[in-house]
Image (cartoon, rainbow, N blue to C red):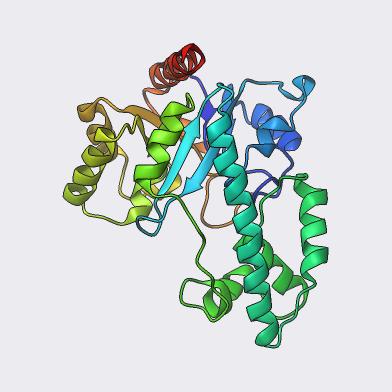
Amino acid sequence: MMRADFHMHSTASDGVMSPELLVWEARQAGVQWMAITDHDTFYGTDSLREEDKVIPVLPGVELSLRDMPGLHLLAYGTAPAPALRRAVEDLEEKRVVRAREMARKLEALGMPLDFPALIKKRRREGGSHATIGRPHLARALVRAGYVKNMQAAFEQFLGEHGPAYVPCERLSMEEALPLILKSGFVPVIAHPRELKLPDEQLLSLIKKWQGLGLMGLEVYHPSAAAGGFDGLEHMARTLGLLVTGGSDFHMPHDGKHGLIGAMSDEWAGIEADVTCLMEAVREMHRKATEQ
C-alpha cells in the first residue's frame, strides 16, 4: 500500500525538523510521496538540494485565511508562481511585524524577550525566509522560565483572547483562491474538521468555495480521526473534489498533530487519490506556463 503525506512543517515555519531531516524521516517512515507545507513560506522546499530529495517532494504552502478561525488553505504546485510567491513573501514580512508587536506586549507584561536574538535564531534554524509565529514566542517564554510549557504560554498570554495577542494580517478566501489558481497551483482546504461546523453548514461553505475555484479537501487529517473520515470523504467525492491527506506533522508526539505518514493507514483510496492530485498539479502547471 502506498504511503503519502501532503501536510508537514519544517523549521522554515513552526516545525522542529529541517527540511532535509524531514524528507529523510519521511523516507524512513515508508512515505513515497510528500509535501512540505510551511506557513506562509516556500523556503522549506526551496532550500532542498536535489540530493536531499530521496523521495518526491511536492512544493506547497499553507495560508491562514481571515474568513473564520481555523480556516487554512493548502496550495500545491510546480509552476513558477511569481504572483503567489510575492504574496507569500508579503505575509512573511507581516508575520515578523506581528511577532515584534507581541514581544512588545510581553515586555510590557514584565516578560521581556530578546527579539533580535530570536529573529537571528529563527534564521539560523530555518533559513533567511523562515517565518516566525506564536509557537516561537511560546518556546522563548518557556526557555526564559516565564511559563512551564507552550500550552501555558498560549492559555495565559498568546491565545486569541490573551493579553499579548495580536491579530495576523491574512488573505480572504476570495483573494487567495484566484491567486493560487492563476499561479498554477492546486488549492485544497486544510483540516476542515478544525472549523468545528455542522456538516450541513460545512457542505454549504465548501460548495461556495468550490464555485470560487476550490479543487480539494484534506479529508485524512488527525482532526477528523475521532469522528471518522466517511462524512468528509462523501462530501469531497460527491462534489468531485480532490481527496488529500496529511499528518500536519510539526514534531513527534505534540498531542495535536500526527506522526509522519500516519494518515496513510486510514486512507483506503490513497493510490488513486494521489494520482488524481498529481495529474491536477501537472494540468495547472501546463495552464500557467501557457498563459
Left-right relation of 258 to 209: right
217 or 81: nearer the eye? 81
89 or 193: nearer the eye? 89
8 or 215: nearer the eye? 215
Query: Which residue is painted at 21% across and 48% down in the image?
Result: 199
x and y percentages locating residue 160 in the rendered image: 47, 71
x and y percentages locating residue 34 in the rendered image: 57, 28
Within the image, what quadrant is residue 28 found in?
A: top right
Left-right relation of 70 to 208: right
Q: Residue furthest front?
A: 291
Q: Residue furthest left?
A: 200
Q: How many marks?
A: 0
Query: Which residue is painted at 60% across and 53% down in the image?
Result: 253
* Vertical placement of residue 58 versus 117, above or below: above
Within the image, what quadrant is residue 113 found in?
A: bottom right
Q: Is residue 220 visible?
A: no
* Vertical placement of residue 87 versus 245, above or below: below
Query: Which residue is painted at 52% across and 27% down in the image?
Result: 4
Within the image, what quadrant is residue 175 found in?
A: top left
Query: Which residue is painted at 61% across and 74% down in the image?
Result: 153
Q: Is residue 18 visible?
A: yes
x and y percentages locating residue 269 in the rendered image: 37, 22
x and y percentages locating residue 138 in the rendered image: 65, 68
